Amino acid sequence: MANFNASQFNAQVRAAQRRAEQQFKREVDRVNRANKKAVDDHNRKAEAHNRRVIADYNRQVDAHNRKADAHNRRVIDDLHRQLSAGRSTTVRYTEPERRLADRVHDAVAQVDPKEYDTFLSYARIDGSEVAAELRAALEDLGVAVWFDHVSIQAGKSQSLQMDQGLRKARSGIALLTPAYLAGRFWTERELGALLGKSTLIPVLHNVTFKDVQEYSGILPDLAGFTTATDSVNDIARKIAAAVTVDN
């Protein structure tokens, strides 16, 4: 019987272990590559799907924005056509309306005890945003502003509250926009009352002094401001100095 060679046996064992380890490593690498490929394929499909969803959403948003822009352009173009045609070139505040306003003033004089430095008149269709910004800037400067969104109380007559605000305010601000100059009952009524104030400040937004001159022969003679050259905050500071000088 041949003698047992321990060294040779150990060498064979180590060689077998190395082969097993190499085979195991190759199998692990193969599985990792397969998993990575599966993950990459999934990610590519997910990214492609997300791109399609985002592109479709963006197309819908673009289509909506185009429709909204087209609608807004039609509204503004119509307002400019009305201005160009010289419609509503004078403020229409009839004598019966004046008499009615006087009776209303007497009837509701004590409803709102608050005093106002100024009444802010504007057209909602295209002046709401800048009017709200101007009102906020003025109130930050300590100016008490009659502003319909804040001053009008729900459940009470809007016209009565507006007429009271017109009477109680010591001055007026007319935010002149294309819609304002095109003529709306409420703005014409407000302007008719504000023209009787000792201080009325025009603020032009998206209109020119020439547009204002075609609308009214009185307003262009009043010292005013335009958002084309001054920021709303700068305009507010200048107005505050004018309407609170005696306070």
Image (cartoon, helix red, strand yellow):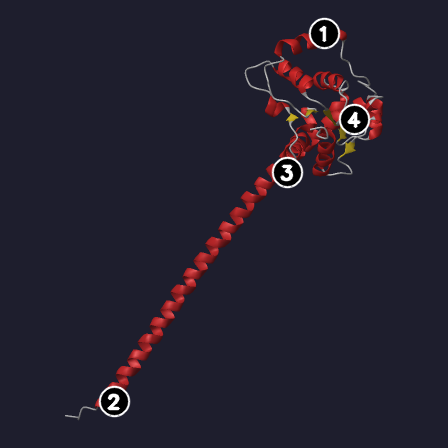
In what quadrant of the picture does the N terminus appear? bottom left
Mark positioned earlier in the residue sequence (3 or 2): 2
Mark positioned earlier in the residue sequence (1 or 4): 4
How many numbered callouts?
4
**Mark 1 to mark 4 CA distance (whole Å):** 33 Å
**Mark 3 to mark 4 CA distance (whole Å):** 26 Å
Q: Position of residue 86 (x, y in %)?
A: 83, 20
Q: Relative to residue 92, is residue 46 drawn left or right?
A: left
Give the class, few, some or many, for how many residues have Cα within 10 Å of label 2's Cα (few <14, many ≥20). few
Q: Relative to residue 92, is residue 61 drawn left or right?
A: left
Mark positioned earlier in the residue sequence (3 or 4): 3
Which of labels 3 and 2 is toward the front?
Answer: 3
Mark 2 falls on what kind of element? Answer: helix
Which of labels 1 and 3 is toward the front?
Answer: 1
Q: At label 4, which amino acid type do we have?
A: His
Give the vertical position of 136 relative to 161 (above or below): below
Mark positioned earlier in the residue sequence (1 or 3): 3
Query: Label 3 belongs to which residue?
Result: 62
Q: Relative to residue 140, is residue 187 drawn left or right?
A: right
Answer with the quarter of the image where residue 14 lies. bottom left
Mark 3 falls on what kind of element? Answer: helix
Mark 1 falls on what kind of element? Answer: helix
**Mark 2 to mark 1 CA distance (whole Å):** 125 Å
Q: What number is the disc on residue 8?
A: 2
Answer with the quarter of the image where residue 192 lies. top right
**Residue in front for this viewpoint, 34 or 221:** 221
- Give the residue at x 63% y 35%: 140
- Give the residue at x 74% y 23%: 180
Mark positioned earlier in the residue sequence (2 or 1): 2
Q: What number is the disc on residue 99?
A: 1
Which of labels 4 and 2 is toward the front?
Answer: 4
**Residue in front for this viewpoint, 8 or 95:** 95
